[in-house]
Image (tube, grey):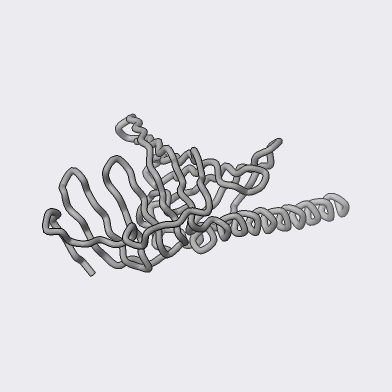
Amino acid sequence: MKYIIVVLIFTNFLMSMSKDKVAKGIKSELDKMKNVIIEFEQVQFWELAGEQSSEFGVVKFVDVQKYKIEMDGNYIIFNNGTVFRYSKENNQILIEKIESNDTSALDIRLLFQLEESFEIFDFNELEDEIKVNLKPKKHGENMILELNLLLSDKFEAKEMEILDIDDNKTIYKIIKIDKKQVFDDNEFNFKDNGKVEVMDLR
């Protein structure tokens, strides 16, 4: 019995060290992800309605404080705490202030907030991939139940799955990452030309 307890303690110690290694690997890879264009596919599953949808998008990513997400003619710009949300259908732009670690929106931005907002609950090492299950650090303060990452063995993000409290699932499949990009700063600002309805909530 004594030996079993020792083995269990040692196993838990190794697992703790391994989680730490995975967390550091993810952080290191995200820290390197600057000035990139990320092409992705978003697949959504709606539990109650039993429906599924899919669309493609692009992230123009300078760093965690400045990036633009484009999908189907709509876009979201995050620029140092100011968010610009453009709706093509309504021809409307919504401007508001938001914290960098806000997780109220269940979109690909969560990939850039892993260290601040989530902690590793479990992981599984495969032949050349790592599956990582993360939970929110602050439970009950957002709509997210859990987040699952599929990484390469070099900790590069390949897929992110978000499960919300209503059992809806959103999957982001990374198609391509183009590095060492140079962006025009105008990409991350909105200039009112009088042709779009503006709702400024700052």
Residue drawn at x 71%, y 57% is: 16
Between 85 and 139, the residue placed more toward the observer is 85
Q: Is residue 74 left or right of residue 163?
A: left
Residue drawn at x 48%, y 39% is: 173
Q: Is residue 98 left or right of residue 197?
A: right
Residue drawn at x 50%, y 48% is: 147
Q: Is residue 193 left or right of residue 17?
A: left
Question: In which quarter of the view is residue 79 placed?
Answer: bottom left
Residue 109's spot in the image, x, y percent?
A: 42, 54
Between 183 and 158, the residue placed more toward the observer is 183
Residue 58's spot in the image, x, y percent?
A: 40, 45
Q: Is residue 176 above or below residue 11?
A: above
Residue 104's spot in the image, x, y percent?
A: 36, 57
Quarter occupied by the C terminus: bottom left
Residue 115's spot in the image, x, y percent?
A: 54, 61
Residue drawn at x 38%, y 50% is: 106
How many discs mark residues in the rendered view?
A: 0
Q: Is residue 116 above or below residue 1?
A: below
